């Protein structure tokens, strides 16, 4: 099915599907590198082989030997190189052929991608290598395990990454799709949307809200009315930080609680997506049991509510272009519209 989607991408356009290239994408979690220090994943339609060398250096290569196109991931790691299991050609982390048992190495090579590890995430640059600047990787904060309870998970979406981004940028659906998390105040909230330094920021303010039992337990609000703010910051192409702030609204003692959830979408193909999510709670606001319960609830919501809905939405759209269907636009769509517009501008600027 995946290979069929890749072929359809190429057939539909006569070339590779258009993705933003000169930017960092999350390829996975550092913990996903198995005991053999290797991970394979398709990103932006390309099969990538990620591995650590003998000295611990992180490398990413196109997962295809240039000789007969066998997956390099089927080979074995030897020091700082991987040897193809088919005919024995070896390639180092730069993509250069380090050994050809059948003759001169010549110009034999495989594409290499800049890749770095930051905060437990593997960031890969799919564009022009000499434009990769580690300083441009988003700094999400709240990922220090000494200060925060940090939990992470993964889902495979049968939907375009833009559609999955829309879901986070417009949280008005919480009241209807997530009854354990939402209240009537969510859809009635004051919403502010702005653009800032290439980002799209959406803030939703709920006043005098009594949180559902599960959230009340996490944020320690009990049955009292509180003010809750949901802020989503979209970083192109599809990384979002959802920060929840909860504060008293009844004139009681000053206090504040909250959480942060990362929603990071990396396109696998034009119609399938890798979904990495990371939740964090401050250790001085919640214990391990509360953190485990919070993450379990989020995971249940993502798996049984968000994913089925978005997958079904994508299936209904099928091969048609989202914009060509002329979706009805509501005031709640401003954030998703601005993010899609910004992403389109960035892709067109690369072409």
Image: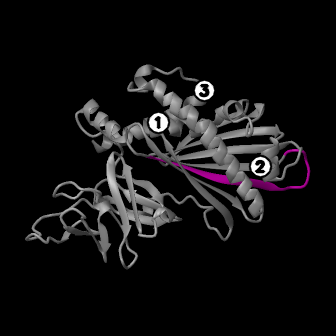
Quarter of the picture holding the N terminus: top left
Give the residue at mark 2: 246
Where residue 345 appears, as percent x and y from the top left, is: 38, 38
Q: First in sequence: mark 3 or mark 1?
A: 1
Give the residue at mark 3: 331
Give the residue at mark 1: 159
Please provide the residue range marked out in magenta: 249-266
Position of 17 compared to 163: left or right? Answer: left
Residue appearing at x 53%, y 60% in the figure:
139
Marks 3/1: CA distance?
24 Å
Position of 186 compared to 248: left or right? Answer: left
Q: Observer-nearest residue: 200 or 268?
A: 268
Say how the picture is coloured.
Answer: one colour
User: CB of mark 2 within 8 Å of CB of mark 3?
Assistant: no
Give residue 5's quadrant in the image. top left
Q: First in sequence: mark 2 or mark 1?
A: 1
Say whether residue 259 is magenta: yes
Residue appearing at x 48%, y 24% in the figure:
316
Residue appearing at x 72%, y 58% in the figure:
291
Give residue 71's quadrant in the image. bottom left
Residue appearing at x 25%, y 32% in the figure:
11
């Amino acid at each position: 099915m995946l290979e069929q989607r890749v072929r359809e991408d190429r057939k539909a356009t006569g070339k590779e599907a258009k993705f933003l290239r000169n930017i960092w994408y999350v390829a996975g979690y550092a913990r996903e590198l198995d005991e053999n220090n290797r991970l394979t994943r398709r990103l932006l339609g390309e099969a990538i082989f990620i591995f650590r060398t003998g000295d611990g250096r992180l490398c990413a290569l196109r997962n295809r030997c240039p000789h007969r196109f066998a997956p390099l991931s089927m080979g074995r790691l030897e020091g700082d190189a991987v040897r193809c299991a088919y005919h024995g050609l070896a390639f180092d982390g730069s993509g250069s052929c380090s050994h050809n048992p059948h003759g001169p190495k010549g110009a034999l090579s495989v594409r290499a991608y800049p890749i770095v590890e930051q905060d437990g995430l593997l960031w890969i640059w799919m564009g022009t290598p000499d434009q990769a600047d580690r300083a441009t990787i988003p700094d999400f904060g709240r990922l220090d395990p000494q200060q925060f309870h940090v939990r992470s998970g993964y889902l495979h979406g049968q939907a375009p990454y833009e559609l999955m981004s829309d879901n986070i940028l417009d949280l008005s659906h919480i009241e209807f799709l997530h009854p354990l998390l939402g209240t009537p105040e969510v859809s009635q909230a004051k919403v502010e949307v702005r653009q800032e330094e290439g980002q799209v920021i959406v803030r939703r303010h709920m006043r005098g809200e009594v949180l559902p039992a599960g959230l009340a337990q996490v944020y320690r609000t009990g049955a009292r009315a509180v003010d809750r703010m949901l802020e989503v910051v979209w970083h192109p192409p599809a990384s979002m930080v959802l920060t929840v702030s909860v504060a008293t609204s009844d004139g009681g003692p000053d206090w504040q609680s909250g959480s942060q959830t990362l929603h990071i979408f990396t396109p696998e193909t034009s119609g399938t997506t890798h979904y990495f999510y990371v939740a964090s709670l401050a250790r001085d606001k919640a214990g391990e049991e509360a953190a485990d319960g919070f993450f379990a609830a989020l995971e249940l919501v993502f798996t049984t509510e968000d994913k089925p809905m978005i997958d079904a939405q994508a299936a209904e759209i099928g091969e048609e272009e989202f914009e060509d269907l002329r979706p009805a636009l509501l005031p709640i769509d401003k954030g998703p519209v601005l993010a899609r517009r910004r992403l389109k501008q960035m892709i067109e600027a690369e072409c």
